[in-house]
Amino acid sequence: MTMKSDLEGEQGITSGPAYAVPPVARAFKLLRHIAGGDTVANMSDTARMLGLSRTTLIRLMATLEAEQMIERTADGRGFKLGLGLAALAGQALFSSDIVQVGDAIIQRLTDTLSLSSHIGVLSGRDVLYVARRTPNVHLVSNVGLGSRLPAHATTLGRAILAHLPRETVTTLFHGVRLTAATAKTPTTLAALARQLDADRDAGIAWSDSNFEVGISSAAAAVFDRSGNVIGAINVTGPTASFAGHARRRHEIIQAVGDAATQISQRLGYAPTRNNDGRRRSL
C-alpha cells in the first residue's frame, strides 16, 4: 500500500493561493516592508499601511524578533532586518551550484586583477547578485550580496541575456519600459537586441560608465552541462582601473573569460569552438 503525502498535489501549491497561510503571508509582507526602509518606529502608522490591526502587528513583530528575523535598531526606537534572516539568505545563495563552484574562482580573479568580482543569475528581468569578492583596495564595488539590478542595464545581465534564445528575451521584455541608468543604457527592445548581439559576438559584455558614471565592468556567461546559460561573472571597478595600455583591456577580457570557462567546465559544460578559437554562441 502506498502512503499518500499530506502535500499530495503539491505542484498546485506553488501556482495558486489555495494553500497559502495568511499569518505567514503577513509576516513576509512585514519583512519586505522593513527591508524597504520602514523601521516601524510608529506601530500605528505601519499597521495602517499594511492593513493590519495594531495587535496583529505587535504579535508579528514579537515573533520575528524572537526568531532573529528582525532586531532593534541602534537607537532602540525601531527595527531592522536581523542576522537570522541574513544567515538564511546566505545559506540559500551559497547552496547554488554556480556559487559553490565559482566562489574560489572569482576570488582568484579578484586577486589577479585587483577588481571586485561577482556572480549573478537572472531573476525575472533583474540580475541577482549571489556571490561577491572585493580586493584589498580603497575603492571597491558597493553592490551587496543579494542585490537586484536591471539585467538590460548591467554587464552581468547582458552576458546572460546575450546567450538566451532571442524569442525568450523578446517575451521577457515585450511591452516593458526599459529604464535608463545612463545615456548608454538601451531603452528599446531593438536597441537591447543590438547590444546583446554585440556582446555575444565579442564573447564578453563590456561597460565603460554604461550603468554608473566612472565605473567600468566586464562580464562573461556561465553555462551548465546542457549548454544552457545559467548565470554570469563580472569584474568591476573605477574606470581608471580598466584604462591605459591596451594590454590591460586584453588582460581583463582574458581573465574574465577564462574564469567563466573554468566555472562552466566544472559544472559539466564542454564548450565548442569556432574556427577562430572563440567559444561558439549557443
Image: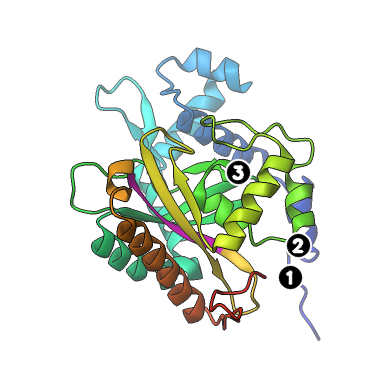
* Highlighted range, magenta: 231-238
For the residue labelled by badge 3, is the local secondary structure a helix, a strand or a loop? helix
Q: Is residue 68 above or below residue 118?
A: above
Query: Label 2 sits on what residue type?
Result: Glu
Q: Nearer the viewer, residue 58 or 248?
A: 248
Q: How far is mark 2 from mark 1, CA to CA? A: 9 Å
| Count of numbered badges drawn on the protein | 3
Q: Which residue is found at the position 46% from the left and 46% from the top?
A: 207
Q: Which mark is residue 5?
A: 1
What residue is shown with label 3?
152
In the rendered view, does 187 fall on the left or right side of 96? right
For the residue labelled by badge 2, is the local secondary structure a helix, a strand or a loop? helix
Question: What's the magenta bit mostly, secondary-structure-wise?
Answer: strand
Q: Quadrant of the C terminus?
A: bottom right
Which callout, 1 or 3, points at the residue further toward the start of the chain?
A: 1
Residue 52, visible in the rendered structure: no
Which callout, 2 or 3, points at the residue further toward the start of the chain?
A: 2
Q: Are marks 2 and 1 in contact (CB under 8 Å)?
A: yes
Q: Quadrant of the N terminus?
A: bottom right
Q: Is residue 177 above or below residue 235?
A: above
On whether residue 212 falls in the magenta region, the answer is: no
Q: How far is mark 2 from mark 3, CA to CA? A: 34 Å
Q: Please tell me whether mark 2 or mark 1 is closer to you in this view.
A: 2
Residue 160, visible in the rendered structure: yes
Q: How far is mark 1 from mark 3, CA to CA? A: 42 Å
